[in-house]
Amino acid sequence: MKKLLILLSFWCAAITANASLITIDVEDKNYGINDTLTANIYISELEDDFGFQTFVTEFTFDFIFAEGLLDFEQVTFGDKLDIDAFFPSDRVDSYTMGQPFTISETTYAFDIDTVQFGLSSFLLASIDFTVVGSGLAEFSLANVDVLDLGFSHDDISSRGTSAQLGNQVAVPEPSTVAILVLALLMLISMKRKAKH
């Protein structure tokens, strides 16, 4: 009986849930005014309690960003949910300044497994902004839900990111004339020290 309990505890430890992870990735870490910043939202670690792959048939989240530093331009959805020409997915990206920026997609395709099978991660959506202010822009997600045929993923975590916005202070390069003058002054100083 003791061996059975030990084996059972090892089995329970082996099937602990892996959380689906949603990450935000920006291409660069520094942006100038009027640059286009693209935030890519990926999902990964798609396994259930027993280690089997889960699929994504629906997702929704609120995207949080620095509204005073960025102007929203557009959302481009990934290509792993909208796969059926006869039953297009339902996509929502409603943004009103000062309100939650909700992004969601629901697929009505019956064969979603043929597209997502074997993928360890894929793109959910990309969001384009124009940089309008200087400062540290932080990006995060709230109210995240990911579903597989109407059932929520066991555990979902999200990871945000940040980017420095605004033109960096440029250090002016010393002119050639200034370098030449400094070199001449050093040469004159060395000659005077040598005479004494």
Image (spheres, grey):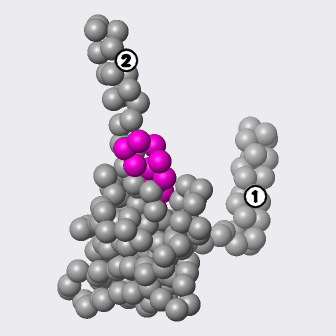
- Density class for disc 1 (Cα within 10 Å; few <14, some 14-19, many ≥20) is few
Where residue 37 sits: x, y (%)?
A: 49, 79
Residue 47 in the image: above or below residue 145: above
Callout 1, which amino acid?
Answer: Ala
Callout 2, which amino acid?
Answer: Leu
Q: CA distance from mark 1 to mark 2?
A: 79 Å
Q: Which residues are magenta?
A: 43-53
Residue 101 visible in the shown view: yes
Q: Nearer the viewer, mark 1 or mark 2?
A: 2
Looking at the rendering, which quadrant does residue 91 occupy?
bottom left
The dot on residue 183 is 1
Along the line of sight, the residue nearer the viewer: 164 or 140: 140
Residue 155 in the image: above or below residue 107: above
Where residue 142 sits: x, y (%)?
A: 26, 67
Residue at 31% x, 68% y is 150
Residue named by callout 2: 7
